[in-house]
Amino acid sequence: MQFSEDSPNERTSYSMMSRFSFGSERLVIFFMLSIVFAEIFLFAGVMQVSLTVHFLVLIGIAFSTIWVRDQEVLYSLQALMLLPLVRIINVSMPISDVPIFIYVSIYAPMLIPLFFLIRHQNLSAMDLGVTFKKAYLYIPFSIVVAFIIAEAEYLAIGPDYLSVNLSTEGMVGISIAIFLFVGLVEELIFRSILQTRLEGLFGLKAGLVFASVLFGIMHSGYGVPAEILLTTAAGFVLGYMFQKTRSLLLVTLTHSFANIFLFVLIPVFGPGVGII
């Protein structure tokens, strides 16, 4: 059997495609760094610059999708667009003393771009990690992990950022809002979509690192360096759990319970919530 060699034009085409693919990966890194810088400006209190950078990231990604042909790169860029959207919505909403309104007003609008992204990328329930297998094991495990994360974050944030003097109805309402909006939406964004896409582009380890760092830096609004470090570490924990189980339920429960401990139970019952 005779094998024909590639023509010079074909070899040149393969070489150009290889360089283009590598350049496209660097484009994803560029936009990730841009988001990090935008959050650094927010952390420094320069909100106008931060929002400008986030807006430019959105525009830049939108235009880059015109010429990017690598599907993994394209899907990763589309996933990154969710982060500037979260921040822009976050700072655009009116200030309210009602915690439930804050959670719903920020995260409910994100369900719209999430829906269209999931449809556009043809992500199935399995791709997103929607499974209820081993739920009986995940619930108690998530509570334990969440408690540890919440106690660590409480030490970093302190009580000034937390809601206090809540009624029983208020505690229940906030807990439901945290489950339905904060935990579920953030885990869909950071684990089911962003981490999965970055893993496909850069590999499991790098994808986990990138998604976790972005998760941490997106908590720069607290203005506490230790909080960014702790949420980055929490992102590693949640991301690793998702890698091993591919269960959106597990990470959503863990994330939600951690926030409920931190923002609902600890302010009322104190550190340890009467357990320790």
Image (cartoon, rainbow, N blue to C red):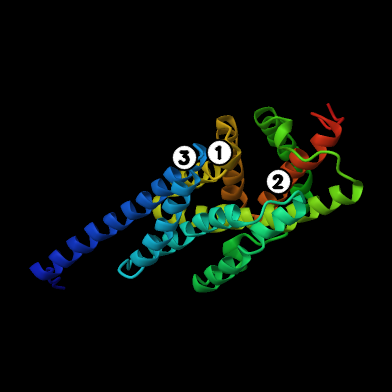
Q: Which quadrant of the structure image shows residue 64?
A: bottom left
How far apart marks 3 and 2 lie (CA) works out to: 27 Å
Q: Which quadrant of the structure image shows residue 118?
A: bottom right
Q: In the rendered structure, which amino acid carries the disc numbered 1?
A: Thr
Q: Position of residue 30 (x, y in %)?
A: 35, 50
Q: What crowding class fits label 2: few (fewer than 14 Cα within 10 Å), some (14-19), or many (20 or more)?
A: many
The residue pinned by badge 1 equals 232
The residue pinned by badge 3 equals 40
Q: Position of residue 47 (x, y in %)?
A: 50, 46
* Depth check, front residue: 163 or 265: 163
Mark in the foreground, 3 or 2: 3
Q: What crowding class fits label 3: few (fewer than 14 Cα within 10 Å), some (14-19), or many (20 or more)?
A: many
How far apart marks 3 and 1 lie (CA) works out to: 14 Å
Residue 54 seen in the current view: yes
Identity of the residue drawn at 58% across and 32% down: 224
Q: What crowding class fits label 1: few (fewer than 14 Cα within 10 Å), some (14-19), or many (20 or more)?
A: many
Left or right placement of residue 27 versus residue 41 in this view: left
Q: Position of residue 198 (x, y in %)?
A: 45, 53
Identity of the residue drawn at 10% across and 70% down: 9
Q: In the displayed structure, would residue 180 be above or below residue 231?
A: below
Q: Earlier in the sequence, mark 3 or mark 1?
A: 3
Element class at badge 1 = helix
| Residue 254: image tag | 2
Tags 3 and 1 touching, CB below 8 Å? no
